[in-house]
Amino acid sequence: MALPGNSSADKAAPVFATTRWSVVLAAGQADSTLAQEALTRLCQTYWYPLYAYARRRGQSRHDAQDLTQEFFARLLEGNWLARADRERGRFRTFLLTAMKHFLANEWHRANARKRGGQAQIFSLDDDAAENRYQSEPCEKATPESLFERNWALALLDDVLRRLEQEYGRDGKAEWMEVMRPALTADRDAISYADIAEKLGLTETAARVAVHRLRQRYRKLIRAEVADTVSSPEEVDEEMRHLFQTLAGG
């Protein structure tokens, strides 16, 4: 399986204007199918952090479910993108700011509707979301810090899904399953001999396979981060923020 490397050509290759959040920002209030699809994809990936944020703000399970659906309904159907500052256009920041305004100023209108009466924009796994929230280590977490942590985890989950799909398409789903622990392990802690035995490889081949997997993982993380900011200059800063958040910094 040929996996992209990490050459200077690879780093320069992406055309930043085609990333999802940049497409959305560039479209603004215009009727753009491409921008709508890009925004919907972003919302589907990052809805859980807002659900957990609403719960941490004291909303009940069912109110948080209704809030999240109503928020995305208004975001996807309205002209809220006019509020996004093109110069400070991180989707993470925009989404949380918009949710804060919604909770402060808009929820009383949505709450006047009959529960369950609003149309669902896309399916949210409410039971899984609540089960996940109940397992959150959030005794001392602020709503904002919980949002940031779940944002980072959602981004990495999406990258893992993409990586699994790539290996699956190449008929190497088993490779991904065996090597998955090596993605986040310290290099000295990786048992290349064990990986080689499970995959029927030489230890040298196992080392190469793990190196390519980790390299591809890093590249996909960077690409996912790029999809949520508005300029290439913001990617490195957002990458640092991502890993600081996961480290509890």
Image (cartoon, helix red, strand yellow):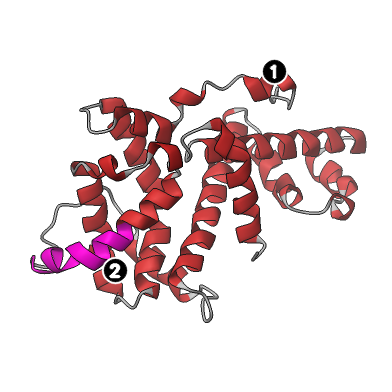
Residue 108 forms part of the magenta stretch: yes
Looking at the rendered image, the quarter that the N terminus falls into is: top right
Left or right of residue 79: residue 86: right
Q: Where's residue 137, x and y in %?
A: 55, 75
Q: Secondary structure at mark 2?
A: helix
Residue 249 x, y percent position in the rendering:
65, 64
Specify which label sits upstream in the sequence, 1 or 2. Answer: 1
- Vertical order, 189 against 165 (above or below): below
Quadrant assignment, res 168: top right
The residue lying toward the viewer, choosing from 166 and 117, is 117
Residue 121 visible in image: no
Q: Is residue 91 above or below residue 10?
A: below
> Which region of the structure is painted magenta?
99-113
List x then y, in percent, for residue 192.
87, 45
> Mark 2 Cα within 10 Å, few/some/many (few <14, many 20+)?
many
Residue 9 is tagged as 1
In the picture of the structure, the residue carrying the numbered disc 2 is 64
